[in-house]
Image (cartoon, rainbow, N blue to C red):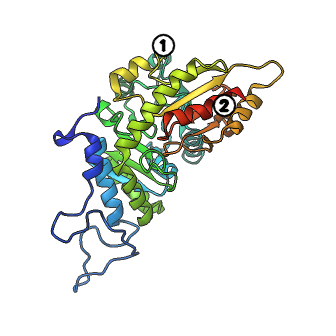
Amino acid sequence: MTSRPTGRALSTTAVTSGRPRAVPDAPLSEPVTLTSTYIADADGSMPPGRVYARASQPNWEALESTLAQLEGAESAFAFSSGAAAMDAALSLVEPGGTVIMHRHGYAGTFTLADAHAAARDVRVVRVDFLDPASLAGLVVDGPALLWAESCTNPMIEAIDLPALARMARRLGALFVVDNTFSTPLTVRPLAHGADVVVHSASKYLAGHSDVIAGLTATSDPELASRMLAHRTAYGAILGPHEAWLVHRGIRTLGVRLDRAARNARELARRLRDHPAVDAVHHPSLDGDPSKPVADRLWDGYGGMISLTLVAEPGTPSVERADAVIAAAHLVVSATSLGGVETMWERRTRHGEPESVPDSLIRLSVGIEDVEDIWADLDAALSA
């Protein structure tokens, strides 16, 4: 369950952290600072941390401070995109090392891992994190990095983070967790043994489908130094206005996630009973394989659902899924998630492992009135 730093709920921390010093006439929120460089002292020396805006920037720092507090980390780093944040985390495995990943996950992460494999002689191994037998027999030679998603994309599986942390220690591997789907308001991976947390901040953290950004967090000084050096050297920096947008979005994360999760729980229940739906994946449902892990580790069940449809004679499942998606009017067909609006898409059009059904629809539940969402889903499914 989610802890309360300094006695306050994390939703309160999201509202209050990363603000300027509270003195009379000060702004309540960090203003957008537009500069590429900083003025030196009379002797030519620079203030600490203020040499050039590729290395430090006030809007990053306010955002980073907030995420660090939410994730229970000592350090956090803002990046130009979720992919840039993932790249920095993947760079932590030494050349010749091994990256261990679950069989299900974000396709972009698999692409990045394969790029590291080609460029740095890194071996990528995909196993089933839900199968104890495949984990028990796992052996690596040399440096390794175990990569997990707290809630998997697109199958919506709750991953047993403490169990994976124990496996990472046994293998001598770094443990990185992508917490994009869950956010720290649902689960804090560092508290369960992770070394690094990664976010596509474009999703739930920003929450309004209007910015591209990424974040990492850690409490390990060496890993923090390496990720900072990676960002500075490769220039994958976040613009000040983009940092401000993400930070502003985090202020309402608590109310947005609460509403989306409540909507998702109700919609998952109704979808399960819909005659056009074959299967629904959401950890709130009795009988869902992920429910025991979610009940033990999560605070709530999140706003992500995936579903498959009942086969229709003479209609390929892919065509049926595409037709249902196209029939919606309120629910948006878009390849993103975590925004205030409800979105869905057929994920295999982007390329997914064979274990993901071709017709699987990923549904990111928004904050609209649940009856309006349901009316649109029901009409699309019944079309």
On the picture, is 106 further left or further right than 14? Answer: right
Tell me the mark number nearer the camera, choosing from 1 and 2.
Answer: 2
Q: Position of residue 130 (x, y in %)?
A: 48, 20
Helix, strand or loop at label 1? It is loop
- Can you name the residue that lies furthest to the bottom here? 42
Question: Which residue is at a point 52% across and 27% down the rendered structure image?
Answer: 267
Q: Position of residue 208 (x, y in %)?
A: 48, 51
Q: Residues within 10 Å of mark 2 (few under 14, many from 20)?
A: few
How far apart, in angstroms, are the residues tagged by discs 1 and 2?
27 Å
Quarter in which the N terminus is drawn: top left
Q: Position of residue 314 (x, y in %)?
A: 84, 21
**Amino acid type assigned to the residue bearing label 1 in the image:** Gly
**Amino acid type assigned to the residue bearing label 2 in the image:** Ala
- Choose top left, top right, bottom left or bottom right for residue 275: top right
Mark nearer the N terminus (1 vs 2): 1
- Residue 379 — which label? 2
- Choose top left, top right, bottom left or bottom right for residue 295: top left
